[in-house]
Amino acid sequence: MKAQRGRWRGEEGGSRATISSLSSVPDTQGTEVPSPPVSVIPLSILLLGDTNRPEFCEARGCLTSCGVVTEFADVNAAAAALTEDRLSPDVMVVAQAFPGEFSHQAIDRLRRLAPLARVVGLMGSWCEGETRSGSPWPATVRTYWHQWPARCNRQLRHLTMGESCSWALPATTTEEERLLADASQHSGADIPVCASESNGGRQECLPHQFQGLVAVRSRSREMADWLSAACRSRGFVTLWQRDLALARVDGATAGVFDVGDFSDDDRESLHCFAAALRPAPVVALLSFPRIEDHRRALSAGATAVLSKPLMVEDLLESLCALPVR
């Protein structure tokens, strides 16, 4: 029988799991008997910033599905709540639309008031060059709005279950060390979840177990090979399609549409690709998309949009979270 994931409250490691539902484990004679059940305490999430901006709306929706979110528009209001012990966050997410919107002093102030909380920067498009020419916050996880949906769900799921992940590493961890930590988890031990009618709408996406056909559209053979290898690592079979070879694909589980700057011609190609796969969902891969590109891709038939450069884990998370049709 599969072991329970997570640990009970009080066990070393500080898990958030608690007792709430029944399960079974074998006794010393091999007979299954009821065991203490395990459920999960939702994360307490402090969300700071103007999340009404279009680029942050999807990220806010992801957070509300991952824990209990308390929003603040400015630092003083968040600091007051922390000072008065009205809030004890596990994670503080700071949505910054442009460099300098929240100063180093403001972030340090919040960190001193909640020293055990992980600080995650939800960065807008204007912040993309800050690490090269600006002054980014130190000791902070940085994730851009277009990376957020797949990455946030995966990382917060691990934090909720008390599992290791790059967001759980010490604050002094470098970005390179976080990338290495994520890469080391790209194995059968880190199994994403696929939507399904079975098992309460969710099923495990097991390596080497057939998950369906994924049509890959890319002009680059190298990129198509890389995407196909990533899909095969989770049990998908892939079919590479190019513009000149675009044809109707029946029975596809999903599609991956890879493009660069997303011109008007690319939008039309995405529309045709989505139509050829319909009703299968399509993940569009765009290079550093702006919110306008995101909207255009969705209107052209994409179900989800990911940005390049791309992490394999983000792609697999998105594929396995797509609705099965």
Image: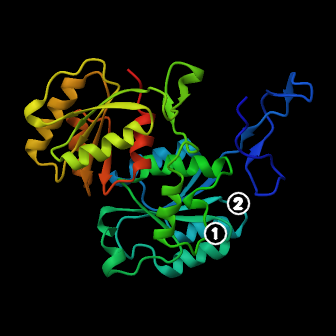
- Visual colour scheme: rainbow
Q: Is residue 50 visible?
A: yes
Determine the secondary structure under disc 2.
loop
Bin the neighbour count of mark 2 within 10 Å (Cα to Cα): few under 14, some 14-19, many 20 and up: few
- Count numbered badges in the picture: 2
x, y (%) of residue 226?
Answer: 31, 47
Instruction: From the viewer's side, name the closer residue of 280 and 19.
Output: 280
Numbered label attached to residue 80: 1
Residue furthest right in the image: 28
Quadrant in which residue 78 is drawn: bottom right
Numbered label attached to residue 307: none
Instruction: From the viewer's side, name the closer residue of 87 and 76.
Output: 87
Determine the secondary structure under disc 1.
helix
| Residue named by callout 2 | 86
Name which residue lies at 24% across and 50% down.
286
Q: Is residue 68 left or right of residue 266?
A: right
Bin the neighbour count of mark 1 within 10 Å (Cα to Cα): few under 14, some 14-19, many 20 and up: some
* Residue type at tag 1: Ala
Q: Is residue 268 left or right of residue 53?
A: left
x, y (%) of residue 284?
Answer: 27, 42
Instruction: From the viewer's side, name the closer residue of 162 and 64.
Output: 162
* Quarter placement of the C terminus: top left
**How far apart are labels 1 and 2 at the CA level?**
9 Å
* Residue type at tag 2: Arg
Q: Is residue 159 above or below residue 37?
A: below
Q: Mark 1 or mark 2: name the one nearer the start of the chain.
A: 1
Quadrant in which residue 191 is drawn: top right
x, y (%) of residue 109?
Answer: 59, 77
Q: Is residue 4 above or below residue 161?
A: above
* Quarter placement of the N terminus: top right
Q: Is residue 294 visible?
A: no
Q: Is residue 92 left or right of residue 54?
A: right
